[in-house]
Amino acid sequence: MAAWSALIRPDVFRSLVIMSSPFEGPPALPFNTANGEFALYFNTTGERNTAIGDSALYLNTEGSRNTAIGNPAMLNNTAGNDNTAIGAGALFSNTDGDSNTAVGADALVTNTTGFNNTADGYQALQSNTEGNFNTASGFERSMTTS
């Protein structure tokens, strides 16, 4: 505790470092940002995630470098990496799909393991579950792609 105090406020706690046990330095920080009730709630090892909104990235445990903005964007993501979800329910069902971009309410909402998909618009690529390398722009575009 003394080493932490000295690290945070060295101007006030100068002598505590000398009296404390060897200080190995601060732990590696995951650099996650969570704002909203239950945002990043189950995160354990995931790093560099941003979750804004009620239950955004709620089930994420080890997924990294994800951005989820909206209630509940990317709620079911557990291990997916490098995803961007902006809008209510965007990438809601994604569990471990990587490198997806969903902008709009319910965009890529049923995607579970698909990767490298881009959906822009309300319910764009709504029915995509495992499809890869798909692009759709506009209201309810390509709802049956899989």
Image (tube, rainbow, N blue to C red):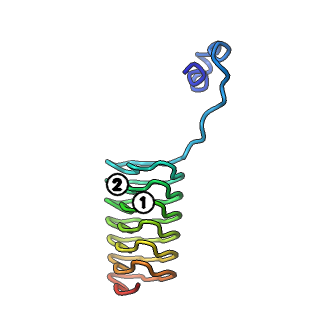
Q: Nearer the viewer, residue 62 or 66?
A: 62
Write down the residue under mark 1. 68
Quadrant showing the C terminus: bottom left
Q: Amino acid at mark 1?
A: Ala
In the drawing, what numbered circle is on residue 55? none
Which of the 4 quarters of the picture holds residue 16? Answer: top right
> Does label 2 or label 1 sit earlier along the sequence?
2
Instruction: Give coordinates of residue 61: x percent, y percent.
Output: 45, 53
Residue 1 to residue 47: above or below: above
- The reply to whether residue 107 is in sight is no
Residue 57 to residue 125: above or below: above
Residue drawn at (42%, 77%), measured in percent from left and top?
Answer: 119
Residue drawn at (40%, 49%), measured in percent from left and top?
Answer: 42
Residue 135 to residue 5: above or below: below
Write down the residue under mark 2. 53
In screen coordinates, is 122 left or right of 131? left
Q: Nearer the viewer, residue 4 or 135?
A: 4
Is label 2 in contact with label 1 (beta carbons under 8 Å)? yes
> Tag 1: Cα neighbours inside 10 Å, few (<14), some, or many (≥20)?
many
> Tag 2: Cα neighbours inside 10 Å, few (<14), some, or many (≥20)?
many
Q: Nearer the viewer, residue 79 or 136?
A: 79
- The reply to whether residue 140 is in sight is yes
- Alpha carbon of mark 2 to alpha carbon of mark 1: how far? 8 Å
Residue 60 to residue 1: above or below: below
Residue drawn at (37%, 51%), measured in percent from left and top?
Answer: 39
For numbered disc 1, what is the local secondary structure? Answer: strand
Quadrant showing the N terminus: top right
Which of the 4 quarters of the picture holds residue 125? Answer: bottom left
For numbered disc 2, what is the local secondary structure? Answer: loop
